[in-house]
C-alpha cells in the first residue's frame, strides 16, 4: 500500500464516519482518544468502538488484518 492508497482509505473512513482522521490521530497520541470518540460519535457507535477496543480477541482480530497492519506501519512512519 502506497501513500496515495493510504490517503484514499483515510479519506473514505473520514467521509463514512464524519470524523476528522488527523484530529483523531492527534487525540490518540495525546491519550484522549476515548474523549474524542465520545464527543464525535453517536452513543451507539462510541459504545461499539469501546467494546471492540476493550475486547482483546476482537482487537487482535481487527489489528491482524493486512489492511490494519499496513495502516499501522504507515502511521508509525509518520512519527
Image: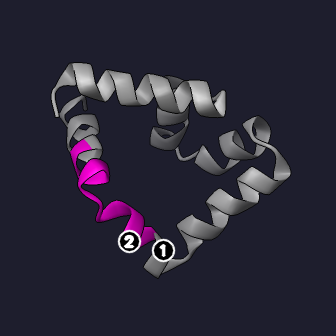
Relative placement, left or right, of 71 versus 62 is left
Q: Residue at horizontal 63%, vertical 58%?
A: 49
- Residue 24 locus on image (x, y percent): 54, 34
Q: Name above or below for residue 11 compared with residue 67.
A: above
Q: Residue at horizontal 63%, vertical 34%?
A: 17
Residue marked by disc 2:
61
Question: Based on the displayed image, in which of its 4 quarters is residue 77 positioned?
Answer: top left
Decide: marks 2, 1 in contact (CB < 8 A)? yes
Q: Which of 50 and 2 is in front in this view?
A: 2
77 is within the stretch colored magenta:
no
Q: Is the magenta stretch mostly helix, strand or loop?
A: helix
Residue marked by disc 1:
58
Q: Residue at horizontal 73%, vertical 52%?
A: 45
Give the magenta-colored segment's residue range: 59-70
- Residue 27 locus on image (x, y percent): 55, 36
- Residue 2 locus on image (x, y percent): 15, 27
- Which residue, as the protein is rendered here, is positioned at the far bottom? 57
Label of residue 9 in the image: none
Q: Quadrant of the C terminus?
A: top left
In this rendering, does residue 20 appear at all? no
Q: Which of 53 and 68 is in front in this view?
A: 68
Amino acid at each position: 500500500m502506497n501513500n496515495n492508497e493510504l490517503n484514499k482509505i483515510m479519506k473514505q473512513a473520514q467521509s463514512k464516519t464524519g470524523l476528522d482522521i488527523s484530529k483523531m490521530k492527534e487525540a490518540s497520541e495525546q491519550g484522549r482518544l476515548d474523549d474524542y470518540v465520545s464527543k464525535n460519535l453517536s452513543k451507539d457507535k462510541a459504545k461499539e468502538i469501546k467494546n471492540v477496543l476493550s475486547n482483546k480477541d476482537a482487537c487482535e482480530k481487527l489489528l491482524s488484518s493486512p489492511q490494519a497492519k499496513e495502516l499501522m506501519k504507515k502511521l508509525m512512519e509518520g512519527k
